[in-house]
Image (tube, rainbow, N blue to C red):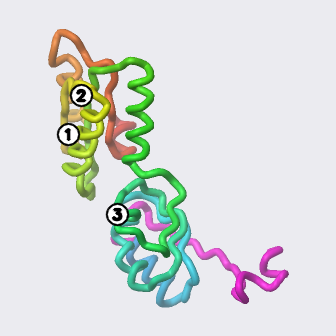
Amino acid sequence: QEVNMAGGVAGFQLKLLSYDDMFDPAVAVLNTKKLIEDNSVFALIGETGTNTTLEVLPMVEEAKIPFIGPTTGSLKTRDPFARHILNVRSSYVDEAIALFSKFAEEGLQRISLFVCPNKQARNFDDLIEKATTLLANFDFQIHSTAISSGTNVSESVVLFRDMYTSTKVGPQAVVLACNAETLVDT
């Protein structure tokens, strides 16, 4: 209100419009189309989740409006650089580097990767490749890798157990790359 009472931002009055996409990419597209075309918004703020963000990204790029704080660590909002996208959280790669740096600091060497993507997940093969490369850069030993379908909690639990007990000496750390629902259920 203070900003609007002082004349707004560059003459624009601020108004927050909020639509629930229910974490569904198709609904996110409909909401974003409504915001851009019907509501003529100046900027979009805070799309939540990688799948919804990546689905609306082409619309945002075409409209060339500021896209502030999409809640994703995906590199697709960072590379190639787009001046209208303002990321406020770190990338998945930056998070992995920080995590692996901590592992190295603690003297951990045997690391396992457990991946359980959701139905809409994209580029998990790229994620595993990047994680494996990062682990090698830190001179870690890949103890084991397991990839679950992410849609069957029982399968995820069995894969995780089998991965953890696959050798006489277990991993010293397990990196989980899972969507929240599967991770909580597992």
Seen in the picture, residue 99 relative to 64 is either above or below; the reply is: above
Q: Nearer the viewer, residue 184 or 40?
A: 40
Contact between marks 1 and 2 (CB within 8 A): the answer is yes
Residue indicated by mark 3? 76
Report whether residue 76 is seen: yes
Instruction: Find residue 173 and report its horizontal and vertical position in percent.
Output: 34, 23
Name the chief secondary structure element in magenta: loop
The residue lying at 45 percent from left, 76 percent from top is 31
Is residue 147 found left or right of 47 in the rendered image? left
Residue indicated by mark 1? 148
Which quadrant holds the N terminus? bottom right
Instruction: Find residue 111 and report its horizontal and vertical position in percent.
Output: 28, 25
> What's the residue type where badge 3 is placed?
Lys
Q: Nearer the viewer, residue 28 or 82?
A: 82
Seen in the picture, residue 66 relative to 115 is either above or below; the reply is: below
The residue lying at 83 percent from left, 74 percent from top is 2
Residue indicated by mark 2? 160
Q: Which residues are magenta?
A: 1-27
> What's the residue type where badge 1 is placed?
Ser
Number of residues whose C-alpha sits closer than 10 Å to that of mark 2, classed few (under 14), some (14–19) or many (20 or more): many
